[in-house]
């Protein structure tokens, strides 16, 4: 065996031994919450398509129409010839929704944060990052070369101390957080973070990937200078975005390498995002369902009310989380185990996500099974 093969084999064996090896199961998503996973029909509590818009007839029709009009691919980066006519409509929609002067759409949410942060920060600067912020915020912060200082999750007290101790040594400072935390479902204290940013001449970036369309905007959201997010969760498709002032957006279009050196999105992705945003604007009661269903689940378990459609059930050990997921699968539910390094060591969990399509009886049955699990654990 050559050294590369040996490296891969040994590394995989180590992951396997600690319950951390990942294998991809083929999953095809039918309508509603039903999926076919490894050949089994399951009710999924593991999709981020909170409003089931990925399969909505109007959204599909928009994608088909755009494909017929413009083809399947953008053909080049947006700065060259990939800036097809649908982009301007989507960007002005997003800016209006977030109350900013302008917006820019990226290839994905991951690409957005990977490009935004290095376009704004360099080696003379500092990024204060929430300990549980999404991997793509860390990727962007690392690429920027800025000093990275982690603050305790949602702790404005810790952030206050860190800003007081370190801010002055650097030229520019960024505070970066998720708006809705992707693995915990809780919300960042945006108003307090905006106060701290203002008091310490720092910029504030908040990643609303799991909020857009399904979590009411919080106090302080309008004070966030860099409002990024994705079109891949409640919007049902693909693509990332940043909403900000006209000058910031113009700078990002000039300087974010993940924007400049990557091909524009397929026209179908842009058209379907516009159709999904139209649908959400016209159907606010429907858009409120995922949060209400998550709250039905937390109420059934006697947990704190869900703040978003994401509810974690923390089991600790990665193997325990895998076993719990397998048990739920035997009862017809798909709830994937989330393990390190996606979440901190010792906090492996079932991550339950709720969509508008979940039936009340299925939610109650899942809650019953989870209650048994938690009773056995304690
Ligand atoms: C999913 C997610 C992303 C990545 O978005 P993609 O469009 O899937 O690349 C970024 N940030 C958070 C918080 C996410 O949950």
Image (spheres, helix red, strand yellow):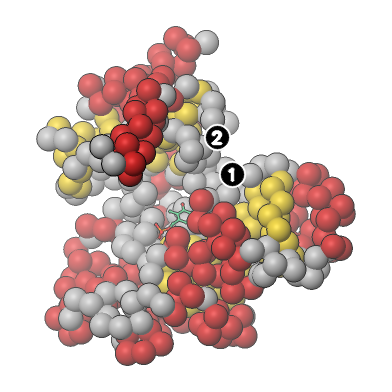
The quadrant in which the N terminus is found is top left
Q: Is residue 138 visible?
A: yes
Task: List x then y, in percent, for residue 342.
Answer: 47, 40
27 is higher (above) or lower (below) than 72: above
- Residue at figure coordinates x 27%, y 81% from the top left: 74
Task: List x then y, in percent, for residue 373.
Answer: 41, 16
Q: Which residue is mark 1?
A: 132
The answer to whether marks 1 and 2 mark residues whose Cβ atoms lie closer than 8 Å is yes
- Residue at figure coordinates x 14%, y 81% from the top left: 68
Q: Residues within 10 Å of mark 1 (few under 14, many from 20)?
A: many
Decide if residue 378 is on the left or right side of residue 284.
right
Question: Where on the image, by quarter, is ligand 1?
Answer: bottom left
Decide if residue 134 is on the left or right side of residue 240.
right
Task: List x then y, in percent, for residue 117.
Answer: 59, 67
132 is higher (above) or lower (below) than 312: below
71 is higher (above) or lower (below) than 170: below
Q: Residues within 10 Å of mark 2 (few under 14, many from 20)?
A: few
Q: Which residue is mark 2?
A: 344
User: Which element carries disc 1, helix, strand or loop?
Assistant: loop
- Residue at figure coordinates x 38%, y 75% from the top left: 262
Task: List x then y, in percent, for residue 100.
Answer: 58, 77
User: Which element carries disc 2, helix, strand or loop?
Assistant: loop
Furthest residue toward front: 2
């Amino acid at each position: 065996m050559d050294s590369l093969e040996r490296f891969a084999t040994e590394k995989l064996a180590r992951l396997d031994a600690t319950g951390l090896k990942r294998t991809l199961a083929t999953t095809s998503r039918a309508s509603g919450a039903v999926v076919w996973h490894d050949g089994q029909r399951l009710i999924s509590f593991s999709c981020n398509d909170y409003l089931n818009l990925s399969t909505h007839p109007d959204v599909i029709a928009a994608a088909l129409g755009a494909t017929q009009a413009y083809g399947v691919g953008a053909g080049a980066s947006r700065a060259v010839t990939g800036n097809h006519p649908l982009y301007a409509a989507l960007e002005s929609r997003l800016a209006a929704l977030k109350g900013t002067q302008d917006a820019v759409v990226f290839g994905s949410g991951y690409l957005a944060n990977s490009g935004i942060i290095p376009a704004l920060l360099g080696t003379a600067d500092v990024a204060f990052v929430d300990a549980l912020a999404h991997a793509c915020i860390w990727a962007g912060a690392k690429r920027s070369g800025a000093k990275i200082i982690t603050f305790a999750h949602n702790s404005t007290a810790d952030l206050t101390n860190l800003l007081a101790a370190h801010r002055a040594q650097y030229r520019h400072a960024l505070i970066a957080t998720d708006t809705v935390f992707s693995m915990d479902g809780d919300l960042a204290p945006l108003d307090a973070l905006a106060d701290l940013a203002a008091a310490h001449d720092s910029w504030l970036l908040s990643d609303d990937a799991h909020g857009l369309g399904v979590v009411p905007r919080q106090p302080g959201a309008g004070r966030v200078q860099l409002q990024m997010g994705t079109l891949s969760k409640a919007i049902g498709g693909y693509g990332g975005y940043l909403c900000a002032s006209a000058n910031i957006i113009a700078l990002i279009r000039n300087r974010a390498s993940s924007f400049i050196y990557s091909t524009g999105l397929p026209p179908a992705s842009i058209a379907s995002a516009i159709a999904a945003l139209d649908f959400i604007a016209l159907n606010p009661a429907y858009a409120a369902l995922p949060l209400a269903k998550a709250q039905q689940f937390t109420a059934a378990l006697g947990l704190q009310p869900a703040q978003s459609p994401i509810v974690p059930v923390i089991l600790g050990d990665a193997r325990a989380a895998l076993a719990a997921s397998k048990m739920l699968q035997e009862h017809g539910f798909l709830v994937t185990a989330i393990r390190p390094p996606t979440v901190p060591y010792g906090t492996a969990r079932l991550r339950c996500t709720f969509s508008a399509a979940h039936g009340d009886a299925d939610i109650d049955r899942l809650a019953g099974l989870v209650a048994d699990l938690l009773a056995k654990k304690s």
